[in-house]
Image: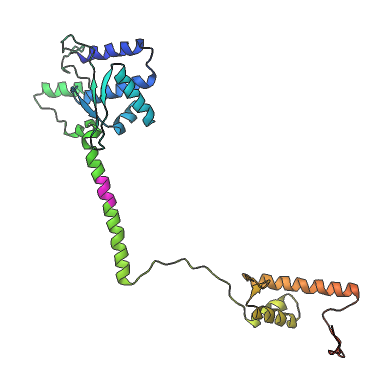
Amino acid sequence: MNYIRHLNSVLDRLAKDQRVLPRHISLYMALFHIWNKLTFIEGMQIARQEVMPLSKIGSINTYTRTIKELDAWGYVKYKPSKSMYQGSKVTIITFDNTGDNSTDNSDGNTGGFITDKTTDKTSAISDGNTPDHSGDKTSDTPLINNYKTLLNKENNNKLLQTNGARAQEEAKDKAGQKPLEKKTVGFKKPELIDVKSYFQEKEINEMEAVRFFNYFESNGWKVGGKSPMKDWSAAARNWILNISRYADKSKENGIDYLSTKNDKDYDEPL
């Protein structure tokens, strides 16, 4: 069979087939590319992770539907695999049954295989040297041949990371070390001297500073008697504002609510 004639024949068939879409052509060419790398074996195993980037198909559903349609229309034979360690089997149906294995190339050195290294191979043979392909095996090896190895490496890396983290935790336990916890800065109760100094800066009577300190000292430094205080200087500013408001209100009514008479009779009922 001549693979050049096969490729020409299948492209003509794809062009005439009204059911064929661009995704069918791109997937078939990706499969043909892998088939060429495997020297056109009768049945080959493929990995979806390898074929999808080659065919530029990004959806798994689209890929599965396309390869099943190529199978149903007689372009390939597709047998999906049920094991994650074994690739699906694909057989390319040939469309050249002339039995002629010659190619359309004039040098006749490719033997029906499509390759971009014909010149290098020809020159190596003419020099009497055996071409060295050891450097090309990595790029020419299908993913399915080392897919299981990649999985094992990934699992081993995860196991090493887990064991490494466990060893660090055990070392911390032996040394009596514990992870440092993030400390939050809480409210710090002021001293009376600090409150007096603050009220003095605001030009407020020192007695108000004492009243402020005693009031909040008695209720545990809580705002409204419920919520814990966060900033005593803010509470002091509010205290100072209330002093001026009470003073203004007492002046309007002619009553000083902040003072009392010296001769007040405390026996009078309220």
Left or right: where does residue 153 sit relative to residue 17? left
Q: Where does the magenta region start and end?
A: 153-158
**Nearer the observer, 194 or 181:** 181
Residue at position x 22%, y 30% from top?
140
Residue 231 position by quadrant: bottom right
Left or right: where does residue 120 sit relative to residue 171? left
Q: Which residue is most to the right?
A: 254
Classify 239 as above or below 29: below
Indicate the position of residue 119 as horizontal and vertical percent values.
19, 21
Q: Is residue 196 visible?
A: no
Residue at position x 30%, y 63% from top?
168
Indicate the position of residue 30 as horizontal and vertical percent values.
30, 24
Indicate the position of residue 193 as horizontal and vertical percent values.
65, 82
Residue 106 position by quadrant: top left
Q: Is residue 157 magenta?
A: yes
Our reading of the magenta stretch's main secondary structure is helix
Left or right: where does residue 67 sit relative to residue 242? left
**Nearer the observer, 138 or 34:** 34
